[in-house]
Amino acid sequence: MLLFLISILGIVFTLRDARAQSVTQPDGHVLVSEAASLELRCTYSYGATPYLFWYVQYPNQGLQLLLRYFSGDTLVEGIKGFKAELKKNESSFNLRKSSAHWSDSAEYFCAVSDT
């Protein structure tokens, strides 16, 4: 069984007003088996419905946008088989992939913004 490490970090973009906001990714590092499902948790604190993002940074590369939520459907499909679902009642925007691959080893960043 092949295992690989996924790292996750949170980002908060600067907002134009004084509303309190934050992003929390409680897992830190996740060990995943090849072909297993993957879930990276992200919760946010924000007074209104924010814009939400997931980014990935592969080794020796820059940040790459995986997916984003602005409005509408709460299930967002991104690149490379990743999906995230906004659950407003839980203030969560968890990233999922049904079958992880060793090439998914990277750092993942959840972000919130008002624009």
Image (tube, grey):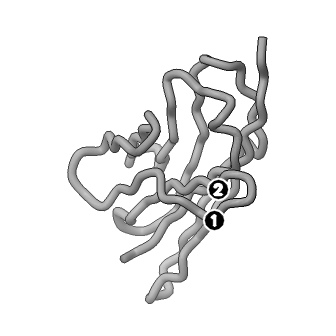
- Relative to 33, say whether 104 is above or below: below
The residue shown at (46%, 58%) is 53
- Tell me the amino acid under the disc marked 2: Gln
Q: Of the two numbered discs 1 and 2 on the same chain, state the one appearing first in sequence.
A: 2
Please provide percent x and percent y for residue 94.
51, 41
Please provide percent x and percent y for residue 36.
61, 18
Q: Quadrant of residue 2?
A: top right
Please provide percent x and percent y for residue 38.
59, 28
Image side of residue 65 versus residue 63, left or right:
left
- Relative to 87, say whether 10 is above or below: below
Single out the residue that lies furthest toward the left. Answer: 72
Assign a secondary structure to mark 2.
strand
Of residue 59 and residue 66, the one placed in the foreground of this image is 59
Of residue 54 and residue 71, the one placed in the foreground of this image is 54
Circles 1, 2 touching at the beta carbon (< 8 Å) = yes
Picture disc at residue 57: 2
Image quarter where the N terminus lies is: top right
Single out the residue that lies furthest toward the front. Answer: 60
Badge 1 is on which residue?
A: 62
The residue shown at (60%, 17%) is 35
The residue shown at (25%, 58%) is 71
The residue shown at (65%, 35%) is 103
- Tell me the amino acid under the disc marked 1: Gly
Of residue 88 and residue 29, the one placed in the foreground of this image is 29
Image side of residue 16 versus residue 13, left or right:
left
Q: Residues within 10 Å of mark 1 (few under 14, many from 20)?
A: few
